Image (cartoon, rainbow, N blue to C red):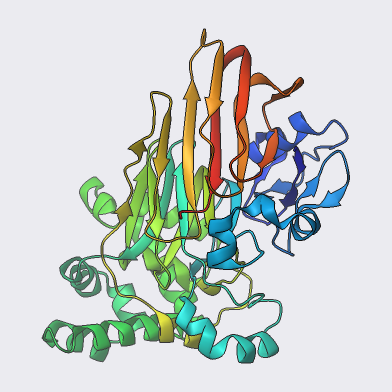
């Protein structure tokens, strides 16, 4: 069953047909008109109320179809998650940095979801946690998790503008911290940075940017001058520009993936990716955004984890590799079919799944699907494809149970 999916036009997305999101949607939907001035940021494939998918031929919400045909989910999903699709599948097309953010864990929402939803109904939109997996479609970059503590100390002690916004007392305490106090002190340093007076942040960023003009090449490289200037150009005067001195800078090549656990701070910076997550739209932001910055809540849940969790896929067959994150809501298969392969049968999944065709063309049940086609596949269905033109690249999301 082919889906018609929601497009999100957030300000950080790529413009017009340069966006992979716009290109995919336009190819699969003849009535979709691309506005070259618009930013096409995300394609949502699933049942979340903020961007629901529809059965294309019937114009029926996928959520309604599932509720009326609950068996399509599969027994495993029903037993574990009830009568809901537990994942949200996406394509992201990123022109400039997303906000510095965390996605809280399930314990947080069990304790505070109702209260926060009442306070900020446009921010905390559902009761679910939001672990997520990003698979690069092109060279991709982001920030994820805290740097090793010695690197953070080095930046604090050798960038006077950063020292000014965090505070000399905090930096001295970090230098003197023991293994039992280091987490508390680092959390306080981050809090002081994110709550620093905006006028002070503006002034110190100007000092830093100005000072880089006369710096030598090695210093510019150490201080990540190019990245700093890009962020400053897109988000002038935003305290989030200083975050590059606390968080890991991560690059992914096409086909590489990273898993972001709940409570881990991160910010995607540029590129296109496939993303899958638990079915949630909850975000706590603290920088690089004009939206609400809920610093106190973010500090409360913040993980100080320093490692970046890149995930290697497992080979399922010659053409299919599957990324299995350590959560039950979702896994993602990457399917690459070569030119000359006449037919291919998708492995039946014990859960409902969503299939996205990124490149290529195939006939499935007498209908032709190609670039941008999105299919909902009921649990245990056997899908046979006749390849028609070129190689094919597809991604399939399903429950990891």
Left or right placement of residue 250 versus residue 233 in this view = left
The residue shown at (15%, 69%) is: 150
Side of 148 where 300 appears, left or right: right
Residue at image location 27% in from the left, 82% down from the top: 186
Tell me what residue is drawn at x 43 percent, y 37 percent. 139
Residue that sits furthest to the top in the current view: 340
In depth, the one of 118 and 9 nearer the eye is: 118
Where residue 371 appears, x then y in whole percent?
A: 67, 27
Name the residue at 69% across, 34% down.
24
Please identify the quadrant where the N terminus is shown: top right
Q: How many marks?
A: 0
- Tell me if residue 72 comes above or below residue 136 in the rendering: below
The answer to which image quadrant residue 163 occupies is bottom left
Question: Percent x, y for residue 35?
Answer: 81, 40
Judging depth in this view, the residue of 110 and 50 nearest the camera is: 110
- Let me know if residue 21 appears in the view: yes
x%, y% of residue 294?
55, 82
Residue 21 place in picture, x, y as percent: 66, 41
Is 99 on the left-hand or right-hand side of 30?
left
Which quarter of the figure has residue 57? top right
Residues 385 and 207: in front is: 385
Camera sees residue 214? no
């Amino acid at each position: 069953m082919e889906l018609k999916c929601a497009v999100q036009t957030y300000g950080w997305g790529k413009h017009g047909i340069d966006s992979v999101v716009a290109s995919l949607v336009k190819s699969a939907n003849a009535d979709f008109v691309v506005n070259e001035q618009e930013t096409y940021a995300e394609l949502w494939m699933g049942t979340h109320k903020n961007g629901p998918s529809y059965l294309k031929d019937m114009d029926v919400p996928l959520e309604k179809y599932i509720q009326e045909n609950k068996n399509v989910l599969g027994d495993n999903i029903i037993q574990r998650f009830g009568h809901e699709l537990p994942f949200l599948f996406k394509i992201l097309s990123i022109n400039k940095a997303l906000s510095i953010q965390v996605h809280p864990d399930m314990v947080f929402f069990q304790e505070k979801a109702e209260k926060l939803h009442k306070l900020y109904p446009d921010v905390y939109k559902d009761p679910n946690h939001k672990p997520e997996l990003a698979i690069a479609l092109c060279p991709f970059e982001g920030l994820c998790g805290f740097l090793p503590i010695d690197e953070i100390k080095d930046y604090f002690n050798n960038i006077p503008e950063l020292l000014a916004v965090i505070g000399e007392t905090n930096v001295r305490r970090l230098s003197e911290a023991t293994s039992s106090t280091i987490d508390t002190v680092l959390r306080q340093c981050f809090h002081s940075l994110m709550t620093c007076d905006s006028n002070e942040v503006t002034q110190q960023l100007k000092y830093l940017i100005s000072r880089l003009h006369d710096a030598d090449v090695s210093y510019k490289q150490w201080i990540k001058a190019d990245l700093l200037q890009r962020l400053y150009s897109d988000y002038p005067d935003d305290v989030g520009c200083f975050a590059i001195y606390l968080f890991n800078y991560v690059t992914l090549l096409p086909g590489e993936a990273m898993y972001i656990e709940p409570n881990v701070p991160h910010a995607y910076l540029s590129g296109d990716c496939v993303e899958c997550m638990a079915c949630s739209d909850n975000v706590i932001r603290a920088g690089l955004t004009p939206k609400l910055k809920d610093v106190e809540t973010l500090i409360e849940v913040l993980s100080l984890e320093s490692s970046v969790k890149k995930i290697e896929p497992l080979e399922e067959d010659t053409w299919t590799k599957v990324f299995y994150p350590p959560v039950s809501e979702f896994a993602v298969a990457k399917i690459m079919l070569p030119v000359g392969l006449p037919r291919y049968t998708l492995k039946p999944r014990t859960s409902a799944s969503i299939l996205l065709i990124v490149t290529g063309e195939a006939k499935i049940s007498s209908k032709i699907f190609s670039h941008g086609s999105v299919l909902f596949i009921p649990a245990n269905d056997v899908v046979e494809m006749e390849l028609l033109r070129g190689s094919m690249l597809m991604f399939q999301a399903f429950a990891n149970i």
